[in-house]
Image (cartoon, grey):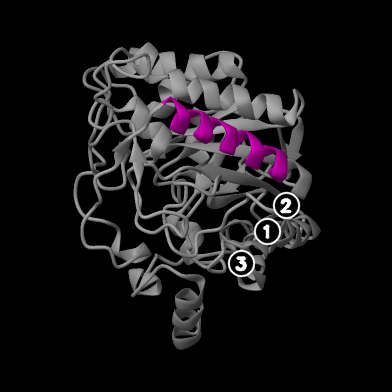
Amino acid sequence: MSDTMQAVDFRSIRFPNRFALAPMTRTSAGADGTPNALMADHYERYAQGGFGLVITEGTYTDDKASQGYANQPGIINDSHVEGWKTIIDRVHAAGSRIFVQLMHAGAQFQANRYTDQPLGPSEVAPKGAPLGLYGDQQTWRVPSTMNDSDIQTVIDGFARSAANAKAAGFDGIEIHGANGYLLNQFLSTYFNRRNDNYGGTLENRLHLVVDVVRAVRKAVGDDYPVGIRLSQGTVTDPDYQLPEGAAGFRQIVEAVRDAGADFVHTTDGDVHRQHFVSGDESLASVAATVEGIDLIVNGGIEETNHQDIANRFPGTLLAVGKKALANPDFVQRLKDGKEIAELDFQMLLPKATITNELAWREQNGS
């Protein structure tokens, strides 16, 4: 048995347990992207609640088109770095480690203080409607097709932000390559209609992802944890599947490993969902077969199944989202045998901000 409460070595870090807080958008930074005291309280709460690892919400990486939401935090200037330092210190004081998730919104763009024009691999807007929990935009804007200069700006932004994150004191970096944001868009045959060396075959569609991983690795050095979150589906199209199937996903995991990633973080509606064009494998089960890279799994992890998932994927970290949002002390509650609450989505209305969550908790005595 692989006990979820036992300490685990994950690359160069020893975590006190196998639970990670999954990254969740909170849109609660200052208007200029600076992390604030409200966010420090928020992330400290999860560290105090027992999570061995805290992964931040998606954090934007340049002053061009990377920001996706109003009040999204950034990590591109001294003000941002100083704001994050306070959060990092408080998470560390509570006994946890913290990774920053670096994100470029690409076409999945609802608000940006630097530009009104999103960029993407092609002039293809996301399916469905924008996310009402994170803004008031009614329809997606059509992105401009990125040229070589735009692509280099993206790579440079990830690299500089990674260096900033290391300087701020983060324990590691997770690159956001999932859920419909820019790097996921380049992997997707729905978004990516290019006919240059960034489009067409999976090897070409991987080009930007690999370049970003390499640039981040170079920026932080060999001994600093770097990983990438991966999915097939997006927040508005959860059923998208890679045409290359499980073999294609394995190719992606191997490519990011070879580019310098220490871990991949798979995310799906359920860890075990069989979500390829054929076969009975899941994202996590495919990634687990790739040697030389560690694994974080996410999707439907809760009090009833965490031990089974830990046994199925020995040595992996388990990233908890909805149950963590409902129970910031989820891990401590498991240890103490206390009741685990279900998520009440009223907590996230009318917008999924920390302020609205706290107001709901005060009203409901939670």
Q: Tell me what residue is drawn at x 75 percent, y 35 percent.
A: 13
Q: Tell me what residue is drawn at x 34 percent, y 57 percent.
A: 110
129 lies above or below 279? below
Q: Are marks 1 and 3 in contact (CB under 8 Å)?
A: no
2 or 1: tag closer to the N-terminus = 1
Q: CA distance from mark 2 to mark 3?
A: 16 Å
1 or 3: tag closer to the N-terminus = 3
Q: Are marks 2 and 1 in contact (CB under 8 Å)?
A: yes
The residue to which callout 1 is attached is: 47
Return the x and y of residue 51 as percentages of the image width and height. Answer: 64, 53
220 horizontally vs 153: left or right: right
Q: Residue furthest bottom?
A: 363
Q: CA distance from mark 1 to mark 3?
A: 13 Å
2 or 3: tag closer to the N-terminus = 3
Work out whether residue 27 or residue 8 is closer to the camera in this orientation and state it.
27
The residue to which callout 3 is attached is: 39
Q: Which residues are magenta?
A: 148-165
Return the x and y of residue 197 as percentages of the image width and height. Answer: 37, 14
Work out whether residue 15 or residue 24 is closer to the camera in this orientation and state it.
24
The residue to which callout 2 is attached is: 96
Q: Which label is found at residue 102?
A: none
Q: Secondary structure at mark 3?
A: helix
Residue type at mark 2: give it: Ser
Q: Tell me what residue is drawn at x 47 percent, y 74 percent.
A: 357
Residue 231 in view in this figure: no
Return the x and y of residue 132 as percentages of the image width and height. Answer: 29, 64
Residue 102 in view in this figure: yes
Residue type at mark 1: give it: Ala
